[in-house]
Amino acid sequence: MKFFVDTADVKEIKELAGLGLVDGVTTNPSLILKSGGNIAEVTKQICDIVDGPVSAEVVATEYKEMMREAKILAKIADNVCIKVPLTLDGLKACRDIRSDGRDVNVTLCFSANQALLAAKAGATFISPFVGRIDDTGSDGMELIAEIKQIYDNYDFDTEILVASVRTVNHVKQAALIGADVVTAPPATLRALVSHPLTDKGLAAFLADWAKTGQKIG
Ligand code: G3P
């Protein structure tokens, strides 16, 4: 399973990449706003750190303008993955951007049928937003299981990129279902390592070690 980090915070990306936790990055207009930077500059900085796919989102809603923006974003670096919304124009753009050999992440997916359409449009990634589904009182992970079954039924190559991840449990459930990728905020990725018994056990080992009076080397 691949780990993408869902942020446009270059400092965070650098730190997490140094820990070997970053297979790719996802950004969106809200995350660019939060970064306080210019989309082209921030995306370039991220691409200089990370070799894997770096999603940068078009903001046009009409096909032709989406294609124009996609061309500009694609020029930033070879690993820029163009993110398009799950609309009819977005799916048409997806098909054409893919035929140029560029990766596409179809975002804002909230149903299995939407995911089916994205796969038929040749999307590299489909991004179902599990946290936002949970917010409405439904179970976001049920959607991941449905998409997994549909993609397996037809051997679609589109990778399931679990997005809007809010908890470490989302990551575990995504892995159990067999999703290809999770994109999570930096704090959630860091939280994956935490367990109180690990902390307790380490403290006990260190206390006993101190009592031996020994040193290694
Ligand atoms: O990158 C899109 C997605 O992960 C957004 O998450 O927390 O704003 O629902 P969130």
Image (cartoon, grey):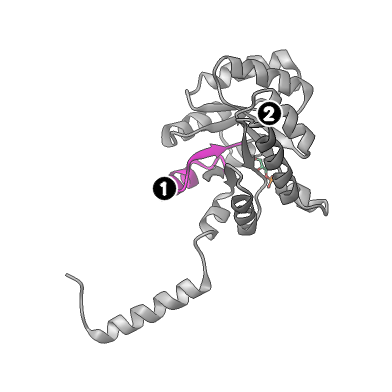
Q: Assess disc 2: are there few (<14), some (14-19) or many (≥20) residues with their C-alpha within 10 Å of its C-alpha.
A: many
Quarter of the image with the C terminus is: bottom left
| Residue 149 sits in quarter | top right
Q: Is residue 66 above or below residue 8?
A: above
Q: Nearer the viewer, residue 195 or 48?
A: 195
Picture coordinates of residue 151 (x, y %)?
67, 35
As shown in the figure, which amino acid type bears the numbered disc 1?
Answer: Gly
Q: Residue furthest bottom?
A: 211
- Name the residue tied to disc 1: 20
Q: Is residue 160 above or below residue 93?
A: below
Magenta-tinted stretch: 6-27
Local SS, label 2? helix
Residue at position x 32%, y 84% in the image = 208
Residue at position x 52%, y 31% in the image = 43
Compute the Cα span from label 2 to label 1: 29 Å
Residue at position x 65%, y 43% in the image = 163
Q: Does any atom of ligand 1 lie closer than 8 Å to the CB of label 1? A: no
Local SS, label 1? loop
- Name the residue tied to disc 2: 119
Q: Nearer the viewer, residue 6 or 20?
A: 20
| Apparent side of residue 180 relative to residue 200 in the rendered image (left or right) | right
Please state the quadrant of the image where ligand 1 appears. Answer: top right
| Residue 98 sits in quarter | top right
Q: Is residue 72 above or below residue 125?
A: above
Q: Residue furthest left?
A: 217
Picture coordinates of residue 33 (x, y %)?
64, 37
